[in-house]
Image (cartoon, coloured by chain):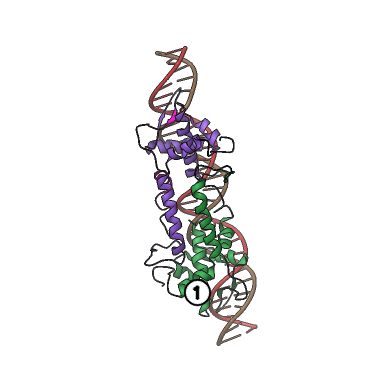
Chain colours: A purple, B green, C brown, D red
Amino acid sequence: MFNKETEYALRGLVYIDLQNMGGRRPGTLEIAREIEAPPFYIAKILQRLVRAGFLRSLKGKGGGFFFDPDKPDVPIINLISSIEGDRSFSGCSFGLKQCDSDNPCPLHGKYAPIREAINKLITEETVQSLAEKVYKNEFHLNEFLK
Amino acid sequence: MFNKETEYALRGLVYIDLQNMGGRRPGTLEIAREIEAPPFYIAKILQRLVRAGFLRSLKGKGGGFFFDPDKPDVPIINLISSIEGDRSFSGCSFGLKQCDSDNPCPLHGKYAPIREAINKLITEETVQSLAEKVYKNEFHLNEFLK
DNA sequence: TTATTAAAAGACAAAAAGGTCTTTTGGTAA
DNA sequence: TTACCAAAAGACCTTTTTGTCTTTTAATAA
């Protein structure tokens, strides 16, 4: 579904938001351990996301990553677009440049509704809404963390 | 949705089946031109698919690629699995090893039905069913070929 | 102000995906 | 049986993805 970088970013940001709820600002090593991602890699990924404005960070003792409470929630479609580009869930499953209801590829009729569902999902859900679900103990982020 | 190799394979096989209907056995250059794929690459891809038993080929004059009429239709899920491996539409969108209705990731509830729809689609459709749609002039394979 | 801490920056590298090309093999037809 | 044709085989290359590591910068606390 998503590439590795997007998966790590999603898990990482949800973990960060979850910790922020408890007043904590996790660092790269803790995040890497808890979401089971390569430490240096998640560090680089978070760095890029900070630069892109999705979240903030603080250096030095007590530093780490956190979301600005004054900023609006982050729909995961924004995250995905920032990492994978816009191509992801807009294209034709056959790879045709031109494919729409007027000129459909042979998979279009059945695939279009699926693509719509995906777009709806990633537009509606935000990092914060996902973290909330984990917080309520209804969902998990890895095999240990409930 | 699919990777490039799968896209080329899908378009290529549908084109071959379509030509077979008219008693023709297209070769790599023709196929590459018609489905807009890199000639050497589609040659390699088709070569692998022949070896995997999805279709047959003939060398020499009048040679080319064709489907054995005695063999059953090829569900595109088989094609996709052969090229991309089984991971494709079975995994968790969050990348968790363990993710099911008992222990769901925060996207599971909304993503599981989508994944099911995708699996249904690629299980039901075959190379032949897709070619049939193009044959009936209801769908197209590229911007020229109707 | 100094030591310590943790992120930022960016070079580097391995692996996978995507693509190209040459040589060999096996058919067809004249 | 010779000439030719087209796929098979496989080496090679480029780009993207994934990942690692070192050095620098900035914040904090003593």
Mark 1: few, some, or many residues within 10 Å (few <14, many ≥20)? Answer: many
> Element at badge 1?
helix
Q: Is residue A48 left or right of residue B18?
A: left
Q: Name the residue rendered at 49%, 45% in the picture.
A: B107
Q: Which residues are magenta?
A: A64-88
Q: Does the stretch in magenta take in A86?
A: yes
Q: Residue at the spot x=51%, y=33% of the render?
A: A31
Front-most of A121 and A97? A121
Is residue A49 in the magenta section?
no
Q: Is residue A72 left or right of residue D10?
A: left
Residues C1 and A16: in front is A16
Task: Please tell me which residue is depicted at 48% across the width and 70% down the height of the picture.
Answer: B31
What percent of the width, then of the height, locates residue B24? 52, 78
With respect to residue D26, does B89 lie above or below? below
Count of number-bearing discs:
1
Identify which amino acid the numbered label 1 is placed on.
Leu
Residue A90 is drawn in which quadrant? bottom left
| Residue A38 drawn at (x, y percent) | 54, 37
Q: Residue at x 53, y 71 (%)?
A: B128
Mark 1 highlights which residue?
B18
